[in-house]
Image (tube, rainbow, N blue to C red):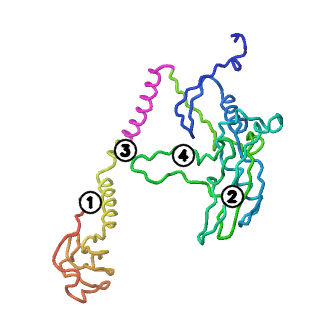
Amino acid sequence: MDSAVDPRYNRHPKVEIRRLTDDYGEFVLRDTDVSMANALRRIMVAEVPTIAIDLVEFENNTTVLNDEFLAHRLGLVPLVSEEADSMVRPFESYMDESQVERVLELSVKCTGSDTLDVTDLDLMPVGHSVVPVTRRLRDEWQPSGGETVNPVKPIVLVKIRKGQELRLRAIARKGIGKDHAKWIPVASAAYQFIPRITVDDVRDVITRALAVLQLKLLDIGAAHSALNALPDGQRAARDAAASSQFALQLGGGGGGGGGGGFGGAAAAGGGYGYGGGGGGGGGGGGGGGGGGGYMPAGGQPQQPGGYGGGGGGGGYMDLSR
């Protein structure tokens, strides 16, 4: 193309296939814009021709589902569409009916006492190779890794009981997803952007990173300087408060003269506490000097012994020292 043409239309897209299987495809589209990617997505969904059941002639239906419901289900059964290229759509040509239609027949009757599943595997082709996809997958399955059961499950159309019968003739035709969703060949088609990161000058990036790091270090240094500037008394009080909170979370901690225990008691034995009592210093899991047990506020121990006992035993250390 002429280089003078608007670069928006002077595109030479490149396609790189990353993964391609029978039921999945992934590729990278380069050197173009999003309109090309979206056009491919729309074409995959609405313009790729496939084969699907378009007309159903019921001969006998005594199942619990009516004819219209079953016809809709049959239309959504995926069929092998390898012959789609050799077929024509109904409005394109009627010269040769074999190029327009493929016929499948289904005839199932339940004669036993158990419920019988009518599936897409019961659809039998008449003189052609257009069959449900599940039939093709089950025929091509090869056991591997100790597998004994075919993992491909058939599509259940309806369940019938004893005496019920379903007999029909299904006509498959070529079509596109723009006409009806049953001709859509893909389950989903989507695209996403691949970020492209370019750096003009590596030194500029490193310089900016160092500037950010310097600011963070200055913030840490300022906080450390402010801490050191506190008087010793304030720093000690702050540390003691933090330690007391931590000690209370662990389960107690008395005051100046009281003992510890579960909950702790005050200096004069105030409050209700287990393991409180007289004595000095920090308490612990045991009582103070006067023996633990139950002690009312402002009084003496009513029952010696109990949960207390012992002098100065510690359940935890005073973390404020």
- State the predominant SS element of the stretch in magenta: helix
Nearer-N-terminus badge (1/2): 2
Position above or below: 22 against 78: above
1 vs 4, front mark: 4
Q: Which of marks 4 and 3 is nearer the N terminus?
A: 4
Query: Given contact means CB atoms under 8 Å apart, are the residues at marks 1 and 2 in contact?
Result: no
Whether residues under marks 2 and 4 lie with C-beta atoms below 8 angstroms apart, the answer is no
**Badge number at residue 226:** 3
Callout 2 amino acid: Ser
Q: What stretch is highlighted in magenta?
A: 200-222
Mark 1 or mark 2, whichever is nearer to me: 2
- Percent of width and height locating residue 320: 26, 60
Which structural element holds mark 3? helix
N-terminal of the two: label 2 or label 3? 2
Separation of residues labelled 4 and 3 (CA atoms)? 78 Å
Q: Choose top left, top right, bottom left or bottom right for residue 50.
A: top right
Q: Mark 1: which amino acid?
A: Ser
Which residue is the site of mark 1? 320
Judge depth for marks 2 and 3 and give the one in front: 2
Percent position of residue 157, x then y: 66, 58
Q: Is 11 left or right of 66, judged from the image as shown? A: left
Quadrant, the N terminus: top right
User: What residue is shown at x 26% (from left), y 73% (from top)?
Assistant: 260
* CA distance for labels 2 and 3: 89 Å
Would you name the residue on which mark 4 appears?
A: 139
Label 1 crowd (10 A; few <14 / some 14-19 / many >=20): some
Q: Which residue is drawn at 24% across and 84% down?
A: 293
Is 224 situated left or right of 166 in this image?
A: left
